[in-house]
Image (cartoon, coloured by chain):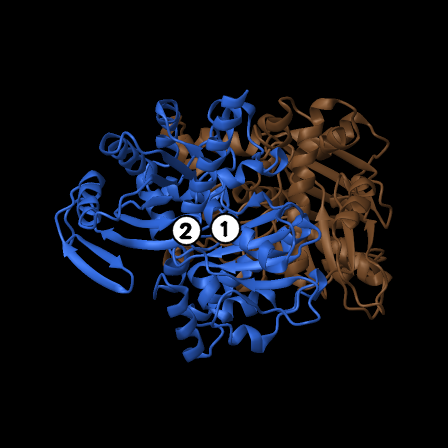
Chain colours: A brown, B blue
Amino acid sequence: MMIVVFELGRRTIRFSGFKDADATPFLSGAIDRCRIHSSKDALAQILSEVRATNRGIVDLKPDVLAVRVPFGGTFFRTPVLVDASVVAALEDMIPRAPIHLPAVVSLIRGCEQTLPGTPIVAVFDTAFFADLPAKEHLYALNADLARSLQLRRFGYHGILHQAACSHVVRQAPGERLRILSICLERRPELAAVADESPVMVTGGATPLEGLPGERSSGDIDPSIPLLLAQKEGYGLEQINDLLTRQSGLLGLVGEPVTFSDVFTGKNPAYESAREVFRYRLLLACGAGVAAMNGLDTIVFSGAYHTLGEILGPWLLSKLKLERPAKLPPVTWSCFPDTIEYVIAQTAAAAAPSGTQEARPAAKRATRGR
Amino acid sequence: MRILVFNCGSSSLKYRLIELPDEKELVGGEAQRVGPKTAEPARIIHRIGKTEETHYVEMPDHAAALGEVMKLLRRDPNLVPDALGHRVVHGGAGFHRHTRIDDAVIEALEPTLALAPIHNPPIVRLIKACRQLYPELPQVAVFDTAFHATIPPHARTYALPRRLREDEGIRKYGFHGISHQYVTTEAARLLGIPLERFNAVSCHLGSGGASLCAVVNGRSIDNTMGYSPLQGLVMSTRSGDLDPAVTLQLLALDYGDCRAIEKTLNSRSGVLGLSGISADIRDVLRKAAESGSETDAADVTAQVYMWRIRKYLGAYLAVVGNAHAVIFTDTIGELVPAVRQAVCSDMECFGLAIDEHRNAHAAKLPADVASDRSRVRILAIATNEELAIARFSYNVLMADAGAAKTGGAA
């Protein structure tokens, strides 16, 4: 079975193709969004590029198309097979994610036009957190205001958190695990997941809240944006750009760096950034442990999951938790699957069974909520 | 030594004359509704021992309030202060310790006015008025931020561009330091642990503002409040933590009107905004108990309020590592057992076990409400900011006198 996964970046549309259960994509790349008229043309353009560059694939005939959707509100609680009602629901939600959703809808339309009849599965970053308890998802804002603007905490790396936690749970069948799931992407996120349900997450109404990222500030005093507007005379776009694209590790170090650089590089300029991030991660871990009244294991996922080999032992040395003697010691592990592969598998499992000869992903399918 | 303590609020002036080192209050009181006229008349509640008298006088500003307070003090020739101690909410980045006031200090306070535009200007004006009135008396500035000067760079640094951090002074300052420092010192003394080896999480839960403080070796290493008192816990009318993108979204909605959003986040959010009932969590808890429904606005508000404290308590216990105690203080921390119970229950992994009976019946403070098997003690301690200001002022003056003596000998 062939699955092609689409992700919308700020400037590009990324695509990756997977065959059966092979975790290595046979096809991957990105198209500059500026070069296409709309994301509607994306698939047609990918197909022609693949043919033109002669990558050894004469016919790209996907069985399933998967689209990563950054925002699904509380309406989309699982991956869904796209039909007219799904597109209508996504369109209704555009005011909540005005930058991303129009492109998603347009991409889906393009897929339908270019490869009619091929099932399209929408996989949502927010779905895992749709049932987050009220005490965790509510901000202490005026209730009417928050309701009218639908301001609440969502959490944004649900796809990876869910896959990593499911993986950990499968290793220890029958145990009710309390997991700190640490997704180390460019915008990292920590979730506390008890018995496969998230009870706490650092991501907020947007992915900006929480841990600092490579270029995003993470938590700051909520009065700081006001200060920047008043004292510095910044406009809203400027402040947004400053907090989401000039802060984080970039702001701390003074030059663009990755999490790998900061944690494995020898440059002394990285030290303070490393300490800030580790400290914020430890705070988040403590909060997550309090949310679950304990901890059984830590799992690292995402592009930088291997940094778990540095951070896992460090966190365990810092978290001096008391533990009943009958329980095994707290462990940590790294979940290596890429977000694209997880999406491909999720989509394969959610696609109608008639469209495929084999369902390699079924045995690793994540739990639908 | 008799120290006259001033605790200056935006529209109030609390004062106490305290004999040190005996810590005996000679007289005290509060000027209320200082400033522009309000629905109720301005007045001074003046307290001598157990008797209280109310004086109605016009007090258009804090200088006028000072004059009226001094008139009351002068009625008794025995009530002459030897020194003055002032609470200063924000010491900026310059003041790392409580400091005796001179011309240079007054000058160094100028840049703090912009950092705390509501609190600091009336305080600095009051200090100036006192210096004119009593040029001969030593005065001490006791800062809410000074205790937090020991917060290390990794905890006080926001992940923002260097220009904002260094040129604009955008960093975590932390607040409620006077109270956190006072109860931390009291807790160490109660437990018989030397302060310089004492580790704790101090929970200052006021009826208005609230913050948690992580303490290692008797020093603050973190505070939930940040650049301003808006960050951190859910407070009576302040939102506490919020996605910065939400601030921007609100700002966009209000066409960039910063004042309006400031007001929304500081005065219309928190317990009041969520519950729609009251800014006082005690009212909300009462209402929640009556309703008994978990989806009731009052119950949801109570859950959000306590959950935020609980998450920060876990976060701070993790960074403190080996805490001797969790301390609860100020109005809610001292008087509301239900909050302590909810926050400390099911926290065995941190070595915390609260005794439900002891907690419910902790009427006389200080009280240890942890069970015998709890590794970490759970203490309810009454804060006393005016006494703390007197004490810290006394310490500064004694240290100065000691230094002067040594200097003279050398």
* Residue beneath disc 2: B387
Please state which of residues A231 and A214 is positioned toward the viewer in this rendering. A231
Q: Residue at x 52, y 60 (%)?
A: B328
The answer to which of marks 2 and 1 sits earlier in the sequence is 1
Q: Is A272 left or right of B5, judged from the image as shown?
A: right
Q: Chain of mark 1?
A: B
Q: Mark 2 or mark 1: which is in front?
A: 2
Give the residue type that dot 2 points to.
Leu
Q: Chain of mark 2?
A: B
Q: Residue at x 49, y 28 (%)?
A: B405
- Rounded to the nearest whole Å, what is the CA distance between mark 2 and mark 1? 9 Å
Give the residue type that dot 1 points to.
Tyr
Figure quadrant of the N terminus of chain B: top left
**Tags 2 and 1 both on a single chain:** yes
Q: Is residue B287 above or below residue B140?
A: below
Measuring from the top left, give residue B134's x and y in whole percent: 26, 33
Q: Is residue B139 visible?
A: yes
Tell which residue pokes out farthest to the top in this image.
B410
Number of residues whose C-alpha sits closer than 10 Å to that of mark 1, classed few (under 14), some (14–19) or many (20 or more): many
On residue B182, the disc is 1
Q: Is residue A99 visible?
A: no
Q: Is residue A195 above or below residue B98?
A: below
Please state which of residues B189 and B113 is positioned toward the viewer in this rendering. B189
Q: Residue at x 41, y 51 (%)?
A: B387
Q: Is residue B57 above or below residue A228?
A: below
Query: Does dot 2 land on a helix, a strand or a loop?
Result: helix
Q: Is A202 left or right of A235, judged from the image as shown?
A: right
Figure quadrant of the C terminus of chain B: top right
